Amino acid sequence: MGLFDFLNNKGEEKPVEAPKPGTTGNTDFFGNKDAAAPAGTGTSYTVVSGDSLSKIAKHHYGDAAKWHQIYDANKGIIGSNPDHIEVGQVLNLPTL
């Protein structure tokens, strides 16, 4: 809508359409899908003090040995050392 459209409509605002259910997931400001956490791949988790991948896996999956799945899904965030996660990192917990 340009300036002339605004003036011709005497300042009337058009109603904004509400988002359709199920379409408001991981998107950025422009509505693009977020590459860091694609929709349907699990949930996000923010690392807190004292966490380790095995503790997170035990709490979310009931099995500490599933830490590998969390690491594989977050190598870009964690880096090459799975023992080094930092407080505040947001990890994707894949659906198993």
Image: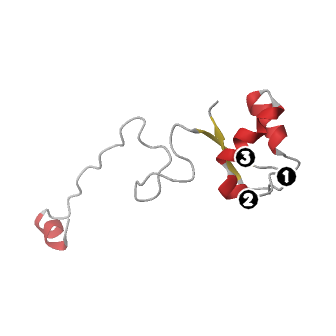
Q: Are marks 2 and 3 in contact (CB under 8 Å)?
A: no
Q: Amino acid at mark 1?
A: Asp
Q: Which mark is residue 83?
A: 1
| Left or right: 55 as drawn, with respect to 15 | right
Q: Which mark is residue 79?
A: 2
Residue 83, placed above or below residue 2? above
The percent position of residue 18, horizontal first and vertical second, equals 34, 43
Q: Are marks 1 and 2 in contact (CB under 8 Å)?
A: no
Residue 27, placed above or below residue 69? below
Q: Quick one: label 1, few (<14), some, or many (20+) residues within 10 Å?
A: few
| Left or right: 85 as drawn, with respect to 41 | right
The percent position of residue 65, horizontal first and vertical second, equals 81, 33
SS class, disc 1: loop
- Is residue 45 in view? no
SS class, disc 3: helix
Q: Amino acid at mark 3?
A: Tyr
* Image quadrant where residue 3 sits: bottom left
| Left or right: 82 as drawn, with respect to 26 | right
**Gap between marks 3 and 1, in whole Å?**
10 Å
Residue on which the image places disc 3: 71
Q: Which mark is residue 69?
A: none
Q: Outermost residue toward the top?
A: 62
N-term-proximal mark, 3 vs 1: 3
Q: Amino acid at mark 2?
A: Gly
The percent position of residue 24, horizontal first and vertical second, equals 44, 43
Q: Quadrant of the N terminus?
A: bottom left
Q: Outermost residue toward the left?
A: 8
Q: Quick one: label 3, few (<14), some, or many (20+) residues within 10 Å?
A: many
**Gap between marks 2 and 3, in whole Å?**
9 Å
